[in-house]
Amino acid sequence: MKRFLDAVRIGPADGSVAVRLLRLAACLLIGGFFIRAALPKIRSPKDFAFIVFSYDVLPDAWVNLVAHILPCLELVCGAALILLPAWRTVSALLIGGLLVSFIAMLVSVILRGIEISCGCLSVDAQGEPIGWNTVIRNVILLACTLLAVWTPRGDRRKRIVHESVL
Amino acid sequence: MNPEAPSRPPVAPDRPSGKIRLPLQALVLAAAAAILSIAANQVREEPFPWSQEWSKRVASAAQLQGFRTAEVQEAQSIVEAGTWFVFDARSPDYFEAGHLPAAMSLPRDTFDEVFLEVGGMLVPEQSIMVYCSGAACDESLDVCTYLEAQGFTNLVLFTGGYDTWTEAGLPTESGL
């Protein structure tokens, strides 16, 4: 198993096999989720822009810009998290930042009583509605993102050395 | 080996230090995302604009299609006149929760079925006003387009929709 983990080079080569497997699973889950979430938005920017506008948190001039760039950022970060070990920390940080802002916007929409589609995994305006379950899912994803970069205390020094040679 | 020989000067690191590596990597990922979004937009059959006035999107599209649009004051006059048919293009759930006085439900998504029931009451010259949730919703524009295709000629689109109506403090009704 250790050879396999070394071969796929997902995550630094420190920590026990169990910790590395856990990080591997977290990287695949979060990276896969973000890649899956990005594709329909990149295919249909107009539909995604309508959902962004419906959140009513951005000025008009920013809506299309966000609808263009946000899905590509999701795709790039998701791919980097899975495929580039040396970029794992930065991609996890960016994904974590995105998730925190998503959670804030979802809560804002719920508190303002706006009934709209989430736009999380599809761009269907009649798709998954926003609710507390959507918020909880994003909190779980945020926890998984932290797990993807988590290193047990005793392994931190080894991790720094490992990352510096990657 | 001469112990007095000067030590070799330190070699400049060929990798950025940890303090600047993360911001540099973040910038690279952001730049990659920006380049990817530009490239994706270039290969689309119909490139999507990078900026537009969303609040006036539906009103602009309606005017381009030749529909007359109404602001809230005119919509109020139309409702009070009592001679117009007023159609609510939102889904039945929203209609049931609240709608303009004397409005009838004609949801965009089930237009064909519902129009079979209400179409018999109308003549092509009938004055009709259509609305949906607010300034950005598409349903009223789509219903106007469908009605025009059925031969109706006197159509008005209330672009502000239900949101503007309630914000103006005007009366509403609820139930089907």
Image (cartoon, coloured by chain):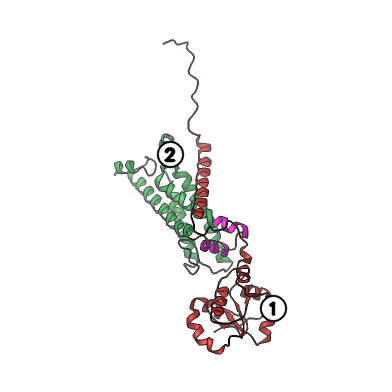
Chain colours: A green, B red
Name the secondary structure under disc 1: helix
Which residue is at a point 33% across and 41% down the rendered structure image? A6
Task: Determine the CA span between mark 2 and mark 1.
Answer: 69 Å
Q: Which residue is mark 2?
A: A156
Q: Which residues are magenta?
A: A46-66
Q: Which residue is mark 1?
A: B74
Residue B157 point in image, percent of width and height:
62, 76
- Which residue type does callout 2 highlight? Arg
Which residue is at a point 42% across and 57% down the rendered structure image? A36
Residue B173 point in image, percent of width and height:
61, 83
- Which residue type does callout 1 highlight? Glu
Say whether residue B33 is visible.
Answer: yes
Instruction: Give a yes or no on whether discs 2 and 1 share a subunit.
Output: no
Left/right of residue B139 with respect to residue A148 in the rendered view: right
Left/right of residue A155 with respect to residue B100 in the rendered view: left
- Label 1 marks which chain's residue? B
